[in-house]
C-alpha cells in the first residue's frame, strides 16, 4: 500500500490559522507523529505529507500545511506554499478552534468553493471549551459538514473519519479505466513501447505499467512490442487488434505501420482522459494553428526527472512546434508542483499526461487556464497535431474529436 503512487491517492489537506491544532489533529487521526507539534505559532513551515491507508478509502495522502494567517516575509512564503496545496487537494479539512471564526476561515471557504473542493470543518480543542454559538450558527447557516473534536483526548475522531467518508468526492470511489473500456473482455490491444533513456533501468514507465494492469483488470489482453517490431507483429495476428497504443515519440512510425482500419492513439492521450479533461485539451490543440513566431509557450511536467539530451518536453516538442510554425517560439518549463498563477503571458500551455500527479491537479490547472482565457493541451495531443495525425489519434474518442474540429 505504501508503494501506491501519490497520483492514485485521495489527497486530504488540513488548513487553518496558526496554532489551531492542525498538526495535532493530523497526528491523532493517523495515530503517528507525522507533524511537529508545539504551542509556538508557526511551527509547521513547509507542507508535511503522510501517505497511509485509511479505511474504507484505501490509500490516501494527508497534507499538513502552514497557518494561512502567517506573518512577515517568511510567513508570506509559507502561506504561498500552503496555497499551492489547494490545487492538489481532493478533500479539505478546515481546522478552527471553538471560539475563532472570521475573515481567514471565510477566505479559505471561498478558495475551496472556487475550486469545487469539498470541505469538512473540524472544531478542535473542545477539551478546553465548547464551540461558540456564533460558530455553530454560521456553520449551520452555510450547511457545512462539521465535527467537534479534541486531538488531545481523541473525542470526535471517529466522527471526523466518517465526515471525511461522507464528504469525499463521489468520483473517487468510481473505478475509472485507462483503456479496457475501448478494448473489451477477451479482446486485444497492441502496446508500442519504445525503450528510451528516461525509462528506469529494468522497468517500464508508469503509464505503460498502469495501462497493462487496466487491461488485465478488464479481462482484456495485450501484446507489448517496440516500434520496429509492430508491423511484423500485426502481420502475424490472425485478426486485427482492437486498438494500437504508442508512446507519442513514435507516433509517425506507428501511424505508418498500423492499418487505417485499426484504431490508434497514444498513452499520453489516454492519460489526458484518465487524469485530465480530454475534451478541453483536444479543443485547446487548435491554438497550435494560431501560433506565430515570437509566441511564448508553457510546458508543464508533473514529475521531476532530470531531462536527457533528447527530452520529449524540453527538446522534441519545442522542435516539432517550431517546425510547424516555421519561426522561433519561446518555451518556459515547470516541473512537479510548480505552476504559474498568471498564465496570461502564454499563447498555449502544454501539460504532460499527469501520471505522477492526481486528476485534481490536472483539472485545477485546466480550470485555471480556462478562467484566464489561455488554451491548454496535452503532450500527446500537441505532438499528434503538429505531426498532422491528430484526427486519427482522437478517433477512438468522438467527443474529443468533435471538440478539436470545432476548436
Image: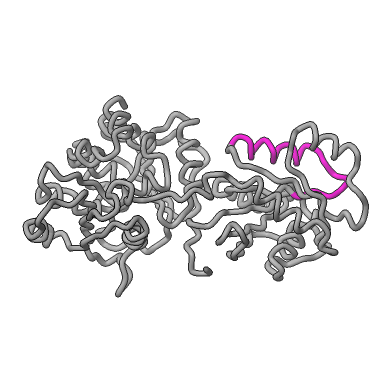
Residue 188: quadrant of the picture: bottom left
> Does residue 292 appear left or right of residue 136 in this picture?
left
Residue at left 75%, top 58%? Answer: 158
Quadrant in the picture for the C terminus: top left
Residue 135: quadrant of the picture: top right
Magenta span includes 344: no
Q: Say which of 331 and 89 sits in front.
A: 89
Is residue 46 shown above or below 248?
below
Q: Determine the residue located farthest toward the top in the rendered image.
A: 406
The residue segment tinted magenta is 95-114
Task: Give percent across and percent down for residue 77.
Answer: 64, 52
The reply to whether residue 332 is in sight is: no
Magenta span includes 96: yes
> Does residue 4 appear left or right of residue 183 in this picture?
right
Task: Give percent across and percent down for residue 304.
Answer: 42, 60
Prevalent SS, magenta region: helix
Task: Give percent across and percent down for residue 259.
Answer: 10, 46
Q: Determine the residue located farthest toward the right in the rendered image.
A: 129
Amino acid at each position: 500500500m505504501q508503494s501506491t503512487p501519490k497520483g492514485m491517492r485521495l489527497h486530504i489537506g488540513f488548513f487553518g490559522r496558526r496554532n489551531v491544532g492542525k498538526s495535532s489533529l493530523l497526528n491523532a487521526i493517523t495515530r503517528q507523529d507525522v507533524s511537529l507539534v508545539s504551542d509556538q505559532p508557526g511551527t509547521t513551515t513547509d507542507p508535511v505529507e503522510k501517505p497511509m491507508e485509511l479505511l474504507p478509502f484505501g490509500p490516501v495522502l494527508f497534507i499538513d500545511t502552514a497557518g494561512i494567517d502567517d506573518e512577515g516575509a517568511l510567513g508570506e512564503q509559507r502561506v504561498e506554499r500552503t496555497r499551492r496545496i489547494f490545487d492538489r487537494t481532493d478533500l479539505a479539512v478546515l481546522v478552527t478552534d471553538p471560539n475563532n471564526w472570521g475573515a481567514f476561515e471565510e477566505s479559505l471557504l471561498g478558495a475551496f468553493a472556487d475550486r469545487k473542493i469539498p470541505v469538512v470543518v473540524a472544531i478542535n480543542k473542545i477539551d478546553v471549551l465548547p464551540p461558540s454559538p456564533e460558530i455553530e450558527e454560521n456553520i449551520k447557516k452555510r450547511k457545512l459538514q462539521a465535527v467537534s473534536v479534541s486531538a488531545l483526548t481523541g473525542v470526535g475522531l471517529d466522527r471526523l473519519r466518517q465526515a471525511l467518508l461522507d464528504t469525499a468526492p463521489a468520483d473517487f470511489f468510481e473505478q475509472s479505466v485507462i483503456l479496457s473500456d475501448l478494448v473489451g473482455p477477451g479482446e486485444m490491444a497492441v502496446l508500442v513501447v519504445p525503450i528510451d533513456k528516461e525509462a528506469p533501468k529494468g522497468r517500464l514507465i508508469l503509464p505503460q505499467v498502469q495501462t497493462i494492469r487496466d487491461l488485465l483488470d478488464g479481462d482484456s489482453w495485450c501484446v507489448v512490442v517496440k516500434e520496429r517490431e509492430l508491423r511484423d507483429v500485426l502481420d502475424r495476428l490472425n485478426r486485427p487488434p482492437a486498438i494500437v497504443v504508442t508512446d507519442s515519440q513514435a507516433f509517425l512510425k506507428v501511424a505508418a505501420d498500423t492499418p487505417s482500419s485499426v484504431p490508434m492513439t497514444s498513452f499520453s492521450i489516454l492519460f489526458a482522459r484518465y487524469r485530465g479533461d480530454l475534451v478541453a485539451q483536444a479543443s485547446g490543440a487548435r491554438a497550435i494553428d494560431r501560433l506565430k513566431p515570437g509566441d511564448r509557450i508553457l510546458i508543464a511536467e508533473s514529475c521531476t526527472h532530470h531531462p536527457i539530451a533528447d527530452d520529449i518536453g524540453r527538446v522534441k516538442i519545442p522542435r516539432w512546434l517550431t517546425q510547424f510554425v516555421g519561426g522561433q517560439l519561446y518555451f518556459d518549463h515547470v516541473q512537479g508542483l510548480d505552476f504559474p498563477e498568471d498564465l496570461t503571458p502564454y499563447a498555449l500551455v502544454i501539460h504532460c499526461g499527469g501520471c505522477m500527479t492526481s486528476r485534481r491537479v490536472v483539472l485545477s490547472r485546466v480550470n485555471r487556464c480556462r478562467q484566464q482565457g489561455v488554451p491548454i493541451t496535452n503532450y500527446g495531443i500537441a505532438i499528434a497535431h503538429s505531426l498532422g495525425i491528430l484526427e486519427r489519434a482522437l478517433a477512438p474518442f468522438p467527443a474529443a474529436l468533435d471538440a478539436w474540429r470545432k476548436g
